[in-house]
Image (cartoon, helix red, strand yellow):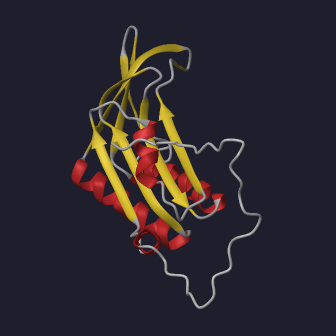
Amino acid sequence: MSSLEISSSCFNRETKLPLSPPLVEDSAFEPSRKDIDEVEEKSKDVINFTAEKLSVDEVSQLVISPLCGAVSLFVGTTRNNFEGKKVISLEYEAYLPMAKNEVKKICSDIRQKWPVKHVAVFHRLGLVPVSEASIIIAVSSAHRAASLEAVSYAIDTLKAKVPIWKKEIYEESSSWKGNKECFWVSNN
């Protein structure tokens, strides 16, 4: 994936900068091709289910845009305990055709509710050790409120509607868990 590169310019003490830009008569501002490309940048949704370790940097890079002043992230990680039991890892399974379709619907819903630019949803499948990411959701927008609200909506809706199952693996046993948000889980 791409990486963020930061460069800086240095001036020696003898460099003099103008206090105001030069005045040029009879010239119109011509935007560069790069400026035009940025204005025409197409929105994208990136959805990935993978057994590979997830990278917060890689996922956040996918949604960065020069048109946006905010990138909001949700990173769900495996914690080391549940109801007094020591958790060794989590194991995720998904019905992929339906899971991908449901995440696409979530991205579409987000675009109808908030003015966002890019959305990325990456979910890990298989074994996920303690402290590693199970899910990363990244959203970019011009201002923070839209991306923050969209990320919150995305994780809540994903847990309620997307067919992903989680098995908690403890030192001595294991247990499949249903999300309490899921419509197909009985809450009796």
Image position of 72 (left or right of 104):
right
Q: Given the current orientation, which residue lies at the most extreme top position? A: 172
Picture coordinates of residue 42 (x, y %)?
Answer: 39, 70
Picture coordinates of residue 158 (x, y %)?
Answer: 44, 51
Q: Quadrant of the N terminus?
A: top left
Q: Nearer the viewer, residue 168 or 71?
A: 71
Instruction: Residue 182: tell me if it is visible.
Output: no
- Look at 47% across and 42% down and name the residue there: 5
- Look at 41% across and 41% down and name the residue there: 3
Q: Given the current orientation, which residue lies at the most extreme bottom position? A: 26
**Above or below 117: residue 156:** above
Please identify the quarter of the rendering in which residue 118 is found. bottom left
Picture coordinates of residue 46 (x, y %)?
Answer: 35, 55
**Above or below 175: residue 102:** below
Q: Nearer the viewer, residue 127 or 120?
A: 120
- Look at 61% across and 54% down and name the residue there: 148
Instruction: Residue 155: tell me if it is visible.
Output: yes
Q: Nearer the viewer, residue 111 or 165?
A: 111
Q: Given the current orientation, which residue lies at the most extreme left position? A: 97
**Above or below 146: residue 79:** above
Picture coordinates of residue 137 (x, y %)?
Answer: 46, 47
